[in-house]
Image: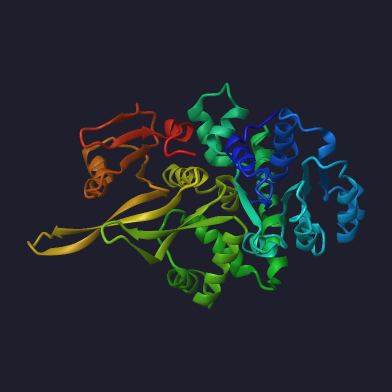
Amino acid sequence: MEIKRDIHLQRLISRKHNGMIKIVTGLRRCGKSYLLFVLFRKHLKEQGIDDRHIIMVDLEDRRNQALRDPDALLAYIDSQFVDDEMHYIIIDEVQLVPEFSDVLNSFLKVQNADVYVTGSNAKFLSKDVITNFRGRGDEIRIAPLSFKEFMSVHADGNRYDLLNEYMTYGGLPQVALKDDVSQKVEYLKNLFTHTYIKDIKERYNLQNDDDLEELINVIASNIGGLTNPTKLANTFKTVKHSSIKNDTIKIYLDLLQDAFLINKSVRYDIKGKRYIDTPSKYYFEDLGLRNARLDFRQIEFTHLLENAIYNELRLRGMSVDVGQVPVLLQTADGKRKWSNLEVDFVCNKGYKRYYIQSALTLDSQDKRQQEFSSLLKIKDGFQKIVVVGTPTATYQNEDGIIIMNVCDFLMSEAGGK
């Protein structure tokens, strides 16, 4: 079955012939190889590119072990050039080659070479990717399946039932293609323990990783909650009886982001137009991995909904911050004091901006007041949206706020791609 990855494919296509090395990065098992070896190759064939001009090397294949030698790989690719027409070089798991950056940089001055690579595991995490290529690397980050892509696998199902499945087991392609729940669960648990944690431990030579694993559990239990290293260190001290330091927690958080497991969203003062470094929110790249980490014990739709919306906004190429609106309130004794109202997401993409609230329901006046109040305090003309977890009809209220059910939001083109 072909899974549609149109957003990522179009981003890849738009970078053809740009004179740079296209580097496809992302969470392990999220579909990087499939994007290049199946979908991108299919695109090239549809464009009339002859097979002789598509040079594909799967370095994870044992049969290509000899090509893991950098000079052997370079010689092999050179031998595949048949004429002066453009040749497309596609290499999977390039980190298996020592000095791979030297090999790839050798093709930067070859006029008829267009290079695409994937890499993963402990030697090929995000922060190192671009620096290895002398300013000539172009990173395309791929995410797990969006809900829209997930629906392309299950086109005939009820979309709210499928949304529950998506937010429970996530969007890793191998999980989406499995029908058996026990197989989904086992796959996710094993992947987290034997791949992601192992990668981080090997890369940074972590000997005592108990605190790292506990930190993952704490973040997983608190997705969408404001926190910082100091607050987390206090949690470890009082609950876990650990003396882990703030600086160590900050390092561990950076490692988890660099491995694409979690993402950080910082606070933004909408009226003051400035960023506030701490506290921040953390979201999981894949909800299935988050739930598996907690043994599927904390399936709160409210928090999962917020995480799913965040991931969708990031997929659409937006920078996503946590909004803060300072307001002057009157207390019960008649005094006035400043308080902060929160906007779940302040989304920016070029000249476009959106303010988005995530709400499980809007079933009472108090709940509507809670969700609308911060948006109504923002006096600019940018679009304001409340995404609701219940199957309500999408509409715009008298204040200009769009109320949209989550399935319409996740299936729409809202916010641009």
Q: Is residue 349 left or right of 15 when viewed as pictured? A: left
Which residue is at the front of the view, 103 or 406?
Answer: 103
Which residue is at the front of the view, 416 or 106?
Answer: 106
The percent coordinates of residue 347 (x first, y second) are 40, 48
The colour scheme is: rainbow
Location of residue 11 (image quadrant): top right
The percent coordinates of residue 274 (x first, y second) are 33, 63
Q: Residue at x 66, y 57 (%)?
A: 137
Count every numbered label the image shows and give the total: 0
Quadrant that contains the N terminus: top right
Q: Residue at x 49, y 55 (%)?
A: 221
Q: Is residue 8 left or right of 246 when viewed as pictured? A: right
Name the outermost residue toward the top.
156
Which residue is at the front of the view, 59 or 71?
Answer: 71
The percent coordinates of residue 197 (x first, y second) are 67, 60
Which residue is at the front of the view, 271 or 40?
Answer: 40
